[in-house]
DNA sequence: CAAGATGTTCTGCCGTGCAGACTATCTCAT
DNA sequence: ATGAGATAGTCTGCACGGCAGAACATCTTG
């Protein structure tokens, strides 16, 4: 016996799909500060209640120090807004501006198409399954101590703020 | 309506899972030059026929220039071997040494455990499904013009060299 | 044999993650 | 109330990896 193929390696598949995703979305997010990361920050900032920088950074897997200038760029573009938290003036609450929301709607449309292009090898049923499984793993990984995230998300999904 | 949650974003899920993978495997691959990338190179080098650097780099999504010192490190550790291709002396053929194969077997064992830890939120059936779907997307993305990769892999998997 | 293409390596630039320091603010114990 | 320690955000400096471009050896084609 020699060895197994790289294609069987989870890391290879993850990395390849991730790179494909980055490639496919870079044109969909052209002009948006921060690229995919900026898109995720903007999406998070568009939630019902404003979120603190650090909480958001941890949830998105972005370093604190990177978060600073990532938000700087988005703020300079007029897409998000930083406000001191009245309950803790050390913290800054992040929320999307009207312009940011409009830009997000536009970006969402482009992203749908890009994501479908990434998953082009799968039929619609498989795509949903893959999204679901990835999300399940990611949720468990991102918030082992924060079960309310699921509730928050459900509330956000049906649009009731 | 405000917006959808980040958790619904494919990029967020992919990134989070990918980071979780890197975190989980870094101890499994401790001491192996290049970390996950080195592991993939070593796995690829352990194939039946030696492969050219550039071909391998493209398949693994590694930059040419990075591939150079990645292989340098693995070669210095005595795990892989560079030889000029007799058919084209510009190219270098990469193959794993005996020591590299032994190290790979050891690494594979540790990686199995690490990968299962990453997918801990899924039951065995779901894990297989996720691997399968990811692999399908990755294969289509990595080799849109190289259908024989599947055959090569099948040959490698059953150990017939 | 000349001209262009290709594989590998090297150099330099940039974006990103990370560690550490610093300021402003909060919390808690006394 | 007040002082000690913790925390949010920012800034600086370092390291690693991707990327562009050049250099060199070699192959291929006319």
Image (tube, coloured by chain):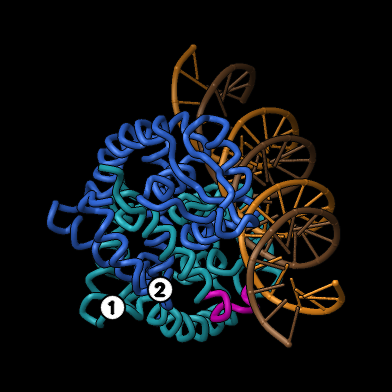
Chain colours: A cyan, B blue, C orange, D brown
Kindly report the distance in space between the C-alpha atoms of the residues bearing marks 2 and 1.
18 Å
Occupied quadrant, residue B138:
bottom left
Badge 2: residue crowd in 10 Å (few <14, some 14–19, many ≥20)? few
Where does the magenta region start and end? A25-32
When the figure is inspected, residue B100 is found, relative to residue A94, above or below; the finding is above
Mark whose residue sits in front, 2 or 1: 2
On the rendered structure, is A156 left or right of C25? left
The one nearer the camera, B120 or A15, is A15
When the figure is inspected, residue B14 is found, relative to residue B120, above or below; the finding is below
Q: Which chain is indicated by disc 1?
A: A
Count up the numbered dots. Answer: 2
On the rendered structure, is B2 left or right of B126? right
Badge 1: residue crowd in 10 Å (few <14, some 14–19, many ≥20)? some
Say whether residue A84 is visible.
Answer: no
Q: Which residue is mark 1?
A: A122
Percent across and percent down for residue B44 are: 41, 50
Q: Which residue is mark 2?
A: B146
Q: Which residue is drawn at the image coordinates 14% and 52% (left, top)?
A: B123
Percent across and percent down for residue B61 are: 51, 60
């Amino acid at each position: 016996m020699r060895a197994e193929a790289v294609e069987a390696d989870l890391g290879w598949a993850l990395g390849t799909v991730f790179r494909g995703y980055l490639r496919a979305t870079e044109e969909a997010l052209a002009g948006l500060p921060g690229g995919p990361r900026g898109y995720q920050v903007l999406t998070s900032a568009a939630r019902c209640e404003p979120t603190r920088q650090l909480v958001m950074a941890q949830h998105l897997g972005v370093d604190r120090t990177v978060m600073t200038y990532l938000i700087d760029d988005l703020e300079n573009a007029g897409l998000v807004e930083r406000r001191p938290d009245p309950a803790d003036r050390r913290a800054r609450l992040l929320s999307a501006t009207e312009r940011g929301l409009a830009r997000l709607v536009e970006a969402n449309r482009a992203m749908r198409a890009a994501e479908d292009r990434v998953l082009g090898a799968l039929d619609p049923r498989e795509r949903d399954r893959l999204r679901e499984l990835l999300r399940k793993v990611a949720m468990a990984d991102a918030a082992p101590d924060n079960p309310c995230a699921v509730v928050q998300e459900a509330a956000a999904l049906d649009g009731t703020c």
